[in-house]
Amino acid sequence: AAIDGAPDDTTGPIMEAILYPLWNAYRAMLKGRLKRAPLQIDSAERRIHMTNGEITSIERRVSLEAHRLIEEMMIQANVCAAETLEQKKTPLLYRVHDAPSQEKLFNLGDFLGTIGKPWTKGEPATTKRFNKLLDETRDTEHAEVVNEVVLRTQMQAIYSPENVGHFGLNLDRYAHFTSPIRRYSDLIVHRGLIRALGLGKDGLTDREIAELPAIADHVVMTERRSMAAERDAMDRYIAAFLEDRVGGSFTGRITGVTRFGLFVRLDETGADGLVPVSSLGGEYFSHDDRTHALVGERTGRRWPLGKRVEVKLLEATPVTGGLIFEMLSEPDARDPNAQAPRLGMRGRGGGGNGPPKRGANRPGGPKPPRGGTPKGVRKGKRR
């Protein structure tokens, strides 16, 4: 890179006038960022490479120091816009991010206990506290799953005319200003600045100010809809890429545990697919939501969140983006020191389509015959 001492014909002439001052400004901003300690969660973004309409590879997107420079300068521009509008007493749409709920913090503490990591549940959540946890587990076998669970502990950021601060960035006030072409929230902030600073006649109107709560709700809805569309498109590209590899085996990690199965993320592509609970073995599996694991009711064997596994790709459906896997690995053995699981709903393993019909050998006994109470059983009054 030019700033690292390798300028070319394009960057060489602008080193003194532009690039050196730019990077010096970034280093000054970086001191403030380190002191502020925003949340340092790793996000595994993927890049799809295509040639002549065909997908040639799917790779993890690399984050460079130049990307972080741009990000930090955009954050400072957004903060400046919010502060300016507040000083001019002009209403605006804030980008707000609330602190995690107590319920989510307690669930995080329960999970961390299963990997031997202490977490004081009553202590308030701060970004420094989360970052300390992430740093302590970064070079361990639990790094990815802790990063995933900490991410799920966070609330979703929204737009609102009422400011509650931004927990993730650890900022008292924050607004989106830098992308008015693609985000309507940014356009509202631009119009607010035009009104506040007297820069023209197309500033924020009194009617728009009165409608800010409704505008905020609508923008949040369309943002989430577009994010879902982006995820669906990515899933469909990945399914199309893997369609020719049905029957192949892949390594990955369990990233989601539900009563109906396990979600596994592949190492090679970052693809997410489902291992149905019906394929896991010949027993019932209960979902222990405290430890994020499926637990065999007879053997106590466990499929915990974060476990590294090998799977076989059974189905890849490009039209929906769905991937179905078969588990090739063995579950973890019963943990004799584990607390009694907090059981949710259970699913049936062994290749069946859902729970079997009631019969003499089914737990709970045979289903009572229709037409009344079984012989020898008295009916009680309802209370």
Image: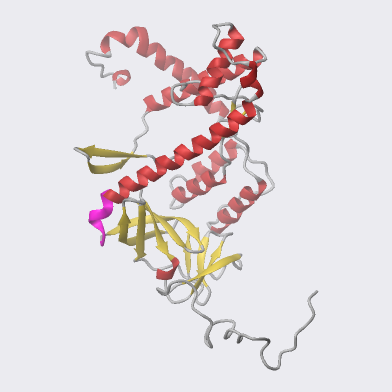
Q: Identify the residue at horizontal 50%, vertical 60% (top origin).
A: 258
Dominant SS of magenta comes to helix
Query: Which of the two residues, 324 or 366, is positioned nearer the viewer here?
Result: 366
Q: Quadrant of residue 87?
A: top right
Report the coloring of the rendering.
secondary structure
Residue 309 visible in rendering: yes
Residue 305 makes an appearance in the image? no
Where residue 201 sits, quadrant-wise, is top right
Q: Is residue 339 above or below residue 256?
A: below
Residue at 60%, 14% (x, y): give it: 84
**Residue 33 spot, x, y in % from top left:** 52, 25
- Give the quadrant of the C terminus: bottom right
- Above or below, 338 against 81 in this view is below
Q: Which is more toward the observer, 284 or 25?
A: 284
- Judged from this view, the residue extending furthest toward the bottom is 376
Q: Position of residue 153 (x, y in %)?
A: 57, 46
In the rendered image, residue 271, in percent from the top left (x then y), is placed at 35, 50
**In this picture, which residue range is highlighted in magenta?**
241-247
Quadrant in the picture for the N terminus: top left
Q: Is residue 243 magenta?
A: yes
51, above or below 188, in the image: below
Seen from this angle, which residue lies furthest front? 371
**Residue in front for this viewpoint, 38 or 195:** 195
Please identify the quarter of the rendering in which residue 325 is found.
bottom left
Query: In the image, residue 203 lies at what x, y percent?
Result: 57, 12
In magenta stretch: residue 332: no
In the image, 123 versus 100, the foreground residue is 100
